[in-house]
């Protein structure tokens, strides 16, 4: 078995990582909390539900992640950002009680297995003038909350945008091939896992680092606190920049029960693609994401992170909610990856119609401009092969036969 690997690291990355022991970059849980309080001059993190995941994660970083010098710096920067944001968000909501009094009404959540077109769909629906999406810069630096007149929310003229762009694009400087897998940028919509990371109950943490003990803890944890923080962040971001929320994360697929407990009126779009193509693609991007921060990423271990069993479990959880009537047919819409790629505007129009959204000529024109400006595969092809996984095509095809039949999903791997 093998998994796609990026080319040699850039010279500056190798030189910096070769400087030696990185333990002087402290990842002590109590010290980081104290530093966040000193940096902001604030004390209240807004509850205690984040504490357990935070400490499990910090311990896993030290024992398991085998971070490079750059990886340790990035991890420390992320943790500081999440902690300081919690402090600032709590204080902003205290001073402006109207923020948490506002409703997040009928948000649209895009989900599905990873690599099934969720990002493309999110970007298209986010270009609807009536839509509101969380952009990378405002999730990284949410306080003070963004204003509507800041170039329709793209943050033109806000110094936080350029700062976020430098920090976010650093991933591509470390692993240049990353752009062909998943484009990053301060003004682009981001996955909800970057919001729930602030609660330290998020696949964002286990995706960026090799932390199996944290991943195991997360798989058994209650995710409602993560979605409650998620709602609080949306309330903050919509305070001076309202709109109809369109949100996205493959991780929602296995957590729909917790999501619906916090957002009972949510509308769900589930994307569908051949799971065999999904597994091959996910293996390569998981390797590259962890490789940003560690030289010790084991390809065999990566292939065990997202298996056929994992895919099937996620799909079955979502199907169970439908079959039990906890997710009504008028609350969920299905989109096939092949349709989205071949007929994007027609496919989005169909989803709008099913969910009761207004698909006007202005909406279509905006989405067409997005397609023209940001063509699919614009950063080159993300190359991966199912054969590299070492899995048996016939066995995996049997595993997903009923799923493919239920949703009319064509096979891409033969």
Image: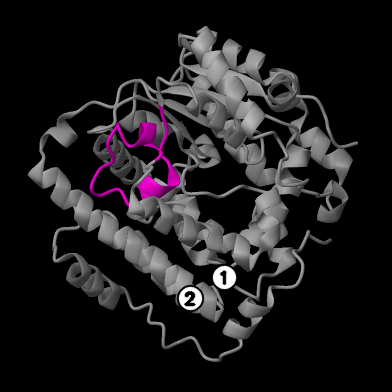
Quadrant the N terminus occupies? bottom right
Q: Name the residue located 63 percent from the left edge and 79 percent from the top edge.
A: 12
Q: Residue at x 27, y 78 (%)?
A: 31
Q: Magenta segment: does it hold 149?
A: yes
In the image, residue 253 sits, relative to residue 196, either above or below, namely: above
Q: Nearer the viewer, residue 249 or 36?
A: 36
Q: Is residue 41 left or right of residue 191?
A: left
Secondary structure of the residue carrying tag 1 is: loop
Few, some or many residues within 10 Å of mark 2 (<14, 14–19, 20+): many
Q: Main secondary structure of the magenta part?
A: loop
Q: Judge whether residue 269 is colored magenta.
A: no
Marks 2 and 1, the one that precedes in the sequence: 2
Say whether residue 166 is left or right of residue 307.
Answer: left
Residue nearest the viewer, comparing 249 with 183: 183
Q: Which residues are magenta?
A: 132-154
Question: Residues at badges 2 and 1 in contact (C-beta under 8 Å)?
Answer: yes
Task: Identify residue for label 2.
Answer: 72
Q: Where, quadrant-wise, is the C terminus in this rendering?
A: top right
Query: Element at badge 2?
Result: helix
- Say if residue 48 shows up in the picture: no
Judge from the rendering whether residue 73 lies leftward or rightward of residue 92; answer left or right. right
Relative to residue 252, is residue 169 depicted above or below?
A: below
Residue furthest to the front: 157
Residue bearing mark 1: 293
Residue drawn at x 67%, y 21% is 344
Residue at 53 percent of width and 76 percent of height: 70
Closer to the camera in the image, 308 or 290: 290
- Please identify the residue farthest to the bottom as the structure is shown: 20
Q: Where is residue 297 shown, x and y percent of the image?
A: 66, 70
State the image coordinates of residue 198 (x, y, percent, origin top left).
Answer: 34, 54
Inspect this view and state whether residue 3 appears.
yes
């Amino acid at each position: 078995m093998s998994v796609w690997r990026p080319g040699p690291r850039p010279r500056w990355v190798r030189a910096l990582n070769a400087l030696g022991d990185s333990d002087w970059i402290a990842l002590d849980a109590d010290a980081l909390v104290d530093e966040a309080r000193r940096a902001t001059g604030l004390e209240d993190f807004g509850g205690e539900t984040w504490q357990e995941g935070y400490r499990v994660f910090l311990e896993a970083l030290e024992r398991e992640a085998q971070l490079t010098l750059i990886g340790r710096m990035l991890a420390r920067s992320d943790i500081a950002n999440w902690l300081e944001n919690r402090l600032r968000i709590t204080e902003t909501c205290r001073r402006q009680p109207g923020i948490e009094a506002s409703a997040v009404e009928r948000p649209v959540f895009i989900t599905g297995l990873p690599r099934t077109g969720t990002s493309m769909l999110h970007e298209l629906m986010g270009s609807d003038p009536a839509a509101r999406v969380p952009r990378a810069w405002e999730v990284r630096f949410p306080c003070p909350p963004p204003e509507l007149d800041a170039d329709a929310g793209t943050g033109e003229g806000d110094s936080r945008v350029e700062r976020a762009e430098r920090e976010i694009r650093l991933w591509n400087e470390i692993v240049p091939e990353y752009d062909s897998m998943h484009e990053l940028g301060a003004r682009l919509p981001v996955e909800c896992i970057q919001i729930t990371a602030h609660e330290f109950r998020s696949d964002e943490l286990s995706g960026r680092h090799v932390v199996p003990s944290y991943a195991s803890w997360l798989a058994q944890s209650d995710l409602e606190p993560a979605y409650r923080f998620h709602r609080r962040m949306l309330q903050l971001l919509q305070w001076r920049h309202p709109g109809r929320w369109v949100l996205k994360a493959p991780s929602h697929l296995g957590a729909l029960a917790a999501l619906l407990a916090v957002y009972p009126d949510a509308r769900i779009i589930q994307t569908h693609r051949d799971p065999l193509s999904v597994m091959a693609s996910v293996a390569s991007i998981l390797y590259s994401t962890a490789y940003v921060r560690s030289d010790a990423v084991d390809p065999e271990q990566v292939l065990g992170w997202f298996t056929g069993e994992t895919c099937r479990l996620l799909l079955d959880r979502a199907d169970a909610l439908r079959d039990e009537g906890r997710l009504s047919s008028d609350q969920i819409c299905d989109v096939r990856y092949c349709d989205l790629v071949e007929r994007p505007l027609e496919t989005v129009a169909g989803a709008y119609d099913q969910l009761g959204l207004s698909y006007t000529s202005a909406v279509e024109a905006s989405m067409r401009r997005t397609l023209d400006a940001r063509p699919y595969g614009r950063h080159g092809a993300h190359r991966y092969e199912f054969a590299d996984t070492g899995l048996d095509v016939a066995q995996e095809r049997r595993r997903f036969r009923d799923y493919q039949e239920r949703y009319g999903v064509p096979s891409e791997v033969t």
